[in-house]
Image (cartoon, rainbow, N blue to C red):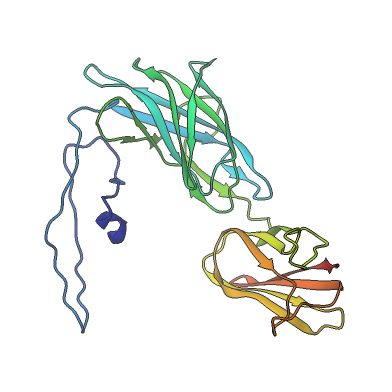
Amino acid sequence: PYNFEEGLKGGVPIASPSPRRYLQLRVKIIPTSAAGAGLDYIGFDFSHSIPAHEVLAEIYPTEVSPKQATRFTYALRPRIRPGDTGFNSLEILTPIRADTVRSVRIDGEEVDFEVEYYDDRFVLHFPKVTRDQTLVEIDFDCLVLRYFGFEGRVFDDELDELPQLVSPGDVVRDLPGDEISVRVSLEEPIVVSVAVSPNPFTPNDDGISDIVNVSYSLLRLEECPVSLEIYDLSGNLVREVYRGMAGSGRYFKAWDGRDEEDKLVPPGVYIYKLSVHADQGEEVKVGTVTVVY
């Protein structure tokens, strides 16, 4: 489960439940007909002290619609024993950049916090938790387009120790389920949230509305063929904006108002056709975009 290239850049976190005293690894070396392979060394960083004996976490809701961002509650409760350091920071992995963190509560009381947003996670800093069975709850908004596990890691940002992975479990009796994974409703279509902006647009190189963006989300997909084409009202192909492979995610494709010969098209109404060829069948979205000068 570990990415070799990421390991060369400085290491990857251990995905096994933690903390653990022992670790067993298996390395597969696969030579090719043109080159052999070898392993020079494997290195590990480890902590002498840990934030907690165990940290249980759960998220709610666990089934969402991909049409809009969902407000989640992420709850965790540590088992802190004598000698454990406690923690004042939490990293939560996200499928895309989270919209916003709304609040942090410790034993039901809202507390001040700082947050750092990244494309695939956010990191929270809050008052240090050192008491056993303290309940920490985080409310945040995030768009989910496919099945995803919101893995979390706690740490003390004042100590030079490794973060500790949380374990899914029953944290709050009133929250259904005891998991940190979220599913997307299977009743939703494959292609959702198609938007065209600006519409109309004016590709006259004046720096204002020169390009139109077609944005869309793909759900529950592995890599599959996707195309975006522009047609005139007579059904003639004007421009193939994109053709390639794509999986679940949010996408933005731009058209500069030019045809296949790189000439500006005449003003008027044009049709975009977004096609996705998935295992469960083809899904096509069409709409109009207007060019004015």
- Residue 122: x %, y % from top left: 47, 38
Identify the residue shown where x is 17% and y is 50%. 24
Q: In which quarter of the view is residue 32 placed?
A: bottom left
Task: Please state if 277 lies on the left or on the right of 9 as rendered.
Answer: right
The N terminus lies in quadrant: bottom left
Task: Please state if 285 lies on the left or on the right of 78 as rendered.
Answer: right
Residue 95 makes an appearance in the image: yes
Residue that extends furthest to the front in the rendered view of this protein:
206
Identify the residue shown where x is 36% and y is 29%. 55
- Residue 257: x %, y % from top left: 75, 72
Look at the picture and state if 33 lies above or below 194: below
* Nearer-the-camera pick, 81 or 5: 5
Residue 169 makes an appearance in the image: no
- Residue 269: x %, y % from top left: 86, 71
Look at the picture and state if 169 lies above or below 250: above
What is the count of numbered marks? 0
The C terminus lies in quadrant: bottom right
Identify the residue shown where x is 48% and y is 43%. 118
* Nearer-the-camera pick, 57 or 258: 258
Task: Please state if 105 lies on the left or on the right of 129 as rendered.
Answer: right
Q: In which quarter of the view is residue 27 placed?
A: bottom left
Look at the picture and state if 221 lies above or below 163: below
Residue that extends furthest to the left in the rendered view of this protein:
40
- Residue 72: x %, y % from top left: 58, 35
